[in-house]
Image (spheres, coloured by chain):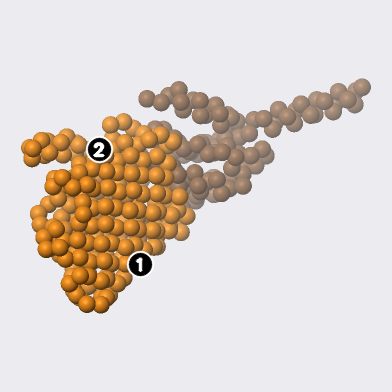
Chain colours: A brown, B orange
Amino acid sequence: MKRFQILLAMTLLAVAAGSTAATIEMTVNGLVCAFCAQGIEKKLKKFPATAEVIVNLEHRLVAVALRDGQDIPDADLRRALTDAGYTVKSISRSETPIADVRERLKQVQP
Amino acid sequence: MVRLYIGLCVAVTAAAPAMAKPIAFADGTTVMAEYGAGTMQELQVFYAPRFDYSVGGGHVDFTSDEDEHREHISYLRLNWLAHRWNLDDAQANVFVWGGAGSATGNWFEGTRLTGNAGLQLDYETRRVYASLKSDLQRSSEFSDRIDTLQLGLAPYKHDYGGIATWFVFQARHYTGELHSGIETAALLRLFKGGAWIEAGVTNAGKVQAMAMFNF
């Protein structure tokens, strides 16, 4: 019975850890048109660690949802955005689910 | 009528939108087709291995509205983004291009080697857009240059995934006896994702239209 409880606890912990995939948010200069967004999205989706990309022109924001347990180094992100023709101003990471980021952006739309 | 037209042009010139660029994004293909009020029709296809250059080709037909002489030019071209300024809420670019091709015409025999060179300067925010473009096609028989100024205004700020709308004023000057004077046009431009269409009418009442696809 005790063994079963330990197994159950470990399973719940693993599920909980997996459900909060990390999100990277980047502020980017030069984001003014849909074509900019299209190019950036295409570039970032080439990383195996990328699960989803959000580009928001209003907030000059590019958000990347990471696959569980994976990451993309800042240097690689900066290089990807520079190679796409844009300038990264800041990079931040959080455990905020990408759906929450999308919802937050919707709420602060002008 | 002329005053009404000028008034309309001034109204839509208050600011400017996104202009067609010879390079959309890295690893992107651009297909552009333009119907220039009966004087110029052009089809272009470019592929950009990087964000700062693209290679491809096109075909352009010129028809003079002065004496009906015609030229048909097929060409290969290299486009280069010479400089880009990424500002907080704006972007500005300098593009240059050059290439070579061959031409036929209804007023000379055979084909002629042509050279192509051009320059584009643009500035864009999500509400205003301005660009100046000069494109030269030259051979031993002709020298045709088209200078185009575009100013645009977006009635609202679009975002990725939505439809972008722009009101555009265009002024165009042709050399090579293709058209005398300045041709102006009022255009409506719409784009969403990688698709872009625009259409309008010139001061002579002729249709001006363009479509562009990026993928």
Q: Secondary structure at mark 1?
A: strand
Q: How many marks?
A: 2
Q: Which residue position holds label 1?
A: B76
Structural distance between the alpha carbons of marks 1 and 2: 32 Å
Instruction: Give x and y (percent) for residue B78.
Output: 36, 64
Q: Quadrant of residue B144?
A: bottom left
Q: Nearer the viewer, residue B47 or A68?
A: B47
Q: Is residue B96 above or below residue A31?
A: below
Q: Earlier in the sequence, mark 1 or mark 2?
A: 1
At x 30%, y 49%, the residue is B210
Q: Nearer the viewer, residue A51 or B142?
A: B142
Three-letter residue code for mark 2: Phe
Q: Which residue position holds label 2?
A: B167
Badge 2: chain ID: B
Q: Is residue B113 left or right of residue A30?
A: left
Instruction: Give x and y (percent) for residue A64.
Output: 54, 38
Q: Quadrant of residue B73?
A: bottom left
Q: Secondary structure at mark 2?
A: strand
Instruction: Give x and y (percent) for residue B111.
Output: 27, 76
